[in-house]
Amino acid sequence: MNKLTDVFVSADFHDQNLPITKTNLFSGNNVTGTVLCETTDKPDSHRCCIMKRQIFSLDMALNSVDDQYKGCREKMADLVETKYMKQEMSNPKSKFAIAWKLAEKKYKPPGDNLTKNHSIAIYVYTNSGFGVHKKFNEADHAIQILKKTQKKCYSTYRGTNLKFIQNVRNKKVSFGSFTSSSMNRNKTKFFGTVSCFEIKTCEGADLTKYSKLPHEEEVLIPPYEMFKVTAVKTRRGQTDLWCDTVYTLKNSGKRSDLNCIPLQ
């Protein structure tokens, strides 16, 4: 399932002063380093991975998995149901299986044309206690369904403790992964104030109604949404800025270079 759904190359980040429990080697977007995944006594977020002492690029994340499954949605859904879900649920003691079963108990009729599995997938994705948020292409489909009823763009915010290249004004960029943001700027300060983003997303979906953590007011941005960097501000030029560096991103359409490849 990782081939289809491991789209969290640089997804979600947390406080760098937490105990390190696992290291992996990551290479991408012109950056190579050690990914430090952490445990925390604050399990109220599924944002968990950081890379210390690195300066990240902001670009189109061409190595990311950004599949929208246009033209093969039903086949992809069938593959997930008949193969990948069975594989994930085959071990009843796995974190995924436990998290899924727990979400089933919390399940309420979804509305918004979401299926039961879509609603459960969002709940599991936002349940940080199990650390299984990387497992979903269901989230991709759920976002597209929600956007049929949420026909508007959102102004959202994202905070990180990472440093990014600053010479990116007027360039097109993509997060290259499912990316969490919040409609409430104050909620993002918990996740970092080194590099922050003010985002105008037109493809992201409001998860508040389905989230385990509705207080986060989360809007989930899909990996295929493109943005134009319209401004880069720093505290050197604006001392009252809410982060060390603030990038302003405006929706610039969609991209999908890997459409339906898993089924070919």
Image (cartoon, rainbow, N blue to C red):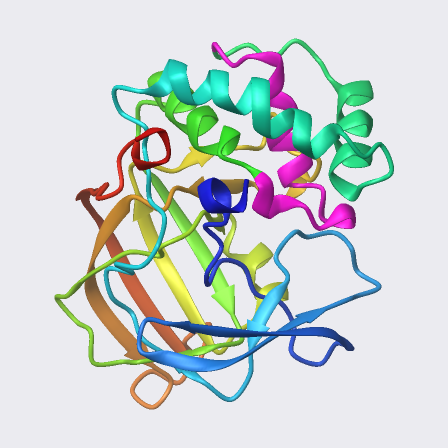
| Viewer-closest of 49 and 62 | 62
Q: Residue furthest front?
A: 264
- Residue 227 visible (yes or no): yes
Which residue is depicted at the point 79% across and 43% down?
95
Residue 54 placement (x, y as % from top left): 45, 85
| Viewer-closest of 198 and 124 | 124
Can you say whether 53 is above or below 167 in the image? below
Which residue is depicted at the point 53% across and 46% down?
2
- Residue 214 visible (yes or no): no
In the image, taking residue 136 as reference, residue 65 lies left or right, namely left
Q: How many marks?
A: 0
In the image, taking residue 47 as reference, residue 183 lies left or right, namely left
Residue 108 placement (x, y as % from top left): 71, 13
**Magenta: predominant secondary structure element?**
helix
Q: Quadrant of the N terminus?
A: top right
Q: Residue 188's quadrant in the figure? A: bottom right
Residue 13 placement (x, y as % from top left): 57, 65
Q: Residue 196's quadrant in the figure? A: bottom left
Can you say whether 112 is above or below 33 in the image? above
Residue 232 placement (x, y as % from top left): 26, 73
Q: Quadrant of the C terminus?
A: top left
Range of the magenta residues?
Answer: 113-135
Can you say whether 112 is above or below 122 in the image? above
Q: Residue furthest left?
A: 170
Which residue is depicted at the point 51% across and 14% down?
114
Q: Is residue 171 within the magenta segment?
A: no
In the image, taking residue 170 as reference, residue 86 lies left or right, namely right
Q: Is residue 134 within the magenta segment?
A: yes
| Viewer-closest of 199 and 257 | 257
